[in-house]
Amino acid sequence: MTLGRTSSGAIKIKTDGGLRAVNCACCGPQDFQPCRDCPPFLGNFNFSLSGDQVGSLTEFQYPSIVCPSDNCNLVPFPNISPRTCSDSWDAFGPSALPDPSYILYVIQIARASTNGELSGCCWTLTLAVQGYFEFEFMGFPDICGVNGSDSINITSLNPAGSYPFTISAACVPPFMGPPTDFNFTVTVS
């Protein structure tokens, strides 16, 4: 068997006098790591959240983990500055229930790859929501348990902007009805 390339650049295999072109599904970097291989973003992330029943929030923001051990050179982990590759923001707000339950909102942003190659570097922005929301059922107020998340890819090097998210939950008793949508906007600055 002989390997070569066709005039269009495809890989060809020559066996028993015949030629055939084959697709190469593994030509990209085999050890692609977005935090190491994508262009760096030198800055901090600030997040804000608005939307259905968000109200006042208690917010917490965390820088990314820089090194999981005492010597990062000994492990395959990118030694990056905090908030240049990923960040996480948690917020708690009062829930619709009259007890001390809270709605938890988690926003995470991290470097990612859209296709496993350097040309596909992007950010993945994720919103997760867990808690109880008010909604209207048959003309009366009711409570809905929400536990869901949604993600989007941002292809710009700088992820600053406002992004819409929809988290759906089956709110109609006995929690098996059509989905009820709760809409949010995450702003990254």
Image (spheres, grey):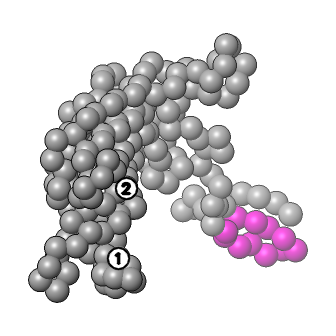
Q: Are marks 2 and 1 in contact (CB under 8 Å)?
A: no
Number of marks in the rendered image: 2
Q: Label 1 amino acid?
A: Ala
- According to the image, label 2 marks what residue? 130
Give coordinates of residue 177: x percent, y percent.
Answer: 34, 85
Q: Which residues are magenta?
A: 12-22
Identify residue for label 1: 170
Residue at image point 79% right, 67% down: 14
For the residue labelled by badge 2, is the local secondary structure a helix, a strand or a loop? strand
Q: Is residue 21 on the magenta stretch?
A: yes
Q: For this view, does 40 lie left or right of residue 164? A: right
Residue 109 x %, y %: 38, 40
Residue 162 visible? The answer is no
* Residue at the extreme top of the image, as rendered: 70
SS at badge 1: strand
* Residue drawn at (52%, 22%) of the image: 66
Q: Residue at x 30, y 40 (%)?
A: 91
Does residue 86 appear to the left or right of 189 in the view shown? right
